[in-house]
Image: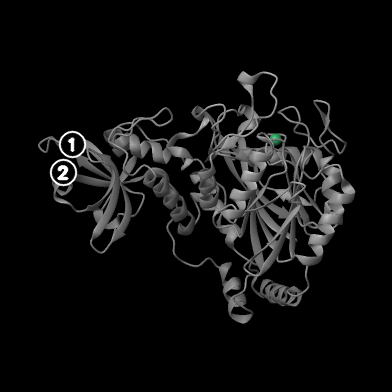
Amino acid sequence: MLHKTRILIRFTLYIALISFLFTGTRVSAQTSLSSVISFENIRTTPPLTKKQVIDSIIEIGKQFLGKPYRYKSAKTPMLDCSGFICHIYDHLDLKLSRSSASQAIQTRRIDFSEVQPGDLLFFKGRNISNNSVGHVSMVIEVNDAGLKMMHSCSRGVIIDDYPMSYYKQRFLFAGRLKEMDEWEQTTAIPAEDTLQVIQDSLVSPKKTSVTMVGVGDLMIGTNFPSSSHLPPNDGKDILVPAHYILQKADVAFGNLEGCILTGEGTVKKCNDPTKCYAFKSPDHYIDHYKNAGFDVLSIANNHVGDFGDVGRKNTTRILTENGIHFAGLEDYPFSIFEKDSITYGFCAFSPNTGTLKITDYAKAKEIVQHLDSVCDIVIVSFHGGAEGAKYNRITRKTELFLGENRGNPYEFSRIVIDAGADVVFGHGPHVVRAIDLYKGRFIAYSLGNFATYSRFNLRGPNGLAPIIELELTQEGVFLNGQIHSAKQSGEGGPIMDATNAAALEIKRLTLLDIPEAPIVISDDGKIEPVRP
Ligand SMILES: [Zn+2]
């Protein structure tokens, strides 16, 4: 909590207060959170968010470029023209029919001049004299020459410029998915943004708040015991549905629940070797975390040591080489990094061998106090508490599980905040738990699973995969937040969940366990502090 920005913030808040008193405009130091909300709300939110969603879909599609027509893998349905469109929209839980003719019925016909990225173009099939729909493509870019469309055709999954003669002769009509249609189109600056514009011009272009996102366990595929536990498309699309949230945060955090190691290591002892839950992702999977926008990962957990020192060393090497900050091992107790002239400190704790202990309060305090003395914002991660659907409550007591002391998450969080922590991200139980606000600092007691491919139980509450987005002052004080609800099903991998199940569950548990928490959580996941 450095003091260098305090005067600037005070002045900005003063301007905001005056503006509020005179105009009744809602005070919002930064509007990013108010305009980025859960999937359900994206439908009624201005175009920036819609564009991000469509960009995500296009990005997923591009990862199949070069695949042959009717490509099919264990995890990918047959990618004929309509199968391809169906599959890429499915990542955002938009369910389309499996034929181009029935997809056409799911759209509203639009004039060619109105076509935008994300719209579908329908064509006749090979037989030009048959006027029924036989082919579909997705528009990915509109330019002076016409547009670019992505589709699966006899030349494979490909991007073509349109018009091109073969398709021009067969063009039937353009359509917009009804879900896309529901999104309001507006380019006007909302009234509440006016304040930001005033602030920007009066004070400084420098940001007055930061956004941070936190997710729980990450294990996006393991090549042990065999590569059958790796996801389709070499893992490239597993995190893509969440890119649009993770990438735009100033800081994105997650718990790396496993090691990174292509080669061999010394696998931990397993009672039943056929069911050995030891995780190692190939080295190049670091690209998937990087592309998703992760800045900092916890490696204090029960799986980082699954392949002994070889695994730990390779993991820290790969993270270092790729510029992802991390902490949690005794050899790597904390990390300090700077982004947009804000200094962040990060440390992580768990009950496991070789990691900083969640039960060693003296050590935790010492590290946090040090970080607080040299950083603006201190983030503390812990992997603790009992595991499984039965253990989703905050007992405020030490939790013992399988004979192991898994810490007292409630007490630990308060101790680190007393020592200077600004955000506490907990995980480990594989299910979500309550959230809390203590001394103006945000706590998530368990973020649950987020992207855990294969080998994980994803039934019921274990399938909830929240992304918690926070807006903080430059000193780490909580301003507001948003729980984006994603879910995992099948083999795993997050997809956005329009039912907001993760947010509703966190709200329910918070009201049960921390009813005094000075926050209000709305059904769509918005988190506001209670102001006196
Ligand atoms: Zn774990």
Residue 402 image label: none
Mark 1–mark 2 CB contact (< 8 Å):
yes
Compare residues 511 and 237 and report the one nearer the observer.
237
Q: Ligand 1, what quadrant? A: top right
Q: Quadrant of residue 186?
A: bottom left
Identify the residue position indicated by label 2 in the image.
Answer: 170
The kind of residue tagged 1 is Gly
Residue 348 relative to residue 282: left or right? right
Spot occupied by residue 208 in the image (x, y as percentages of width and height): 66, 70
**Helix, strand or loop status at disc 1:** loop
Chain-order first, disc 1 or disc 2: 1
3D distance between C-alphas at marks 1 and 2: 7 Å
Using the image, determine if residue 114 lies above or below residue 309. Answer: below
Residue 293 relative to residue 437: left or right? left
**Helix, strand or loop status at disc 2:** helix
Q: Quadrant of residue 344?
A: bottom right
Q: Residue at x 55, y 58 (%)?
A: 248
Identify the residue position indicated by label 1 in the image.
Answer: 125
User: Can I make out residue 219 in this image?
Assistant: yes
The kind of residue tagged 2 is Arg
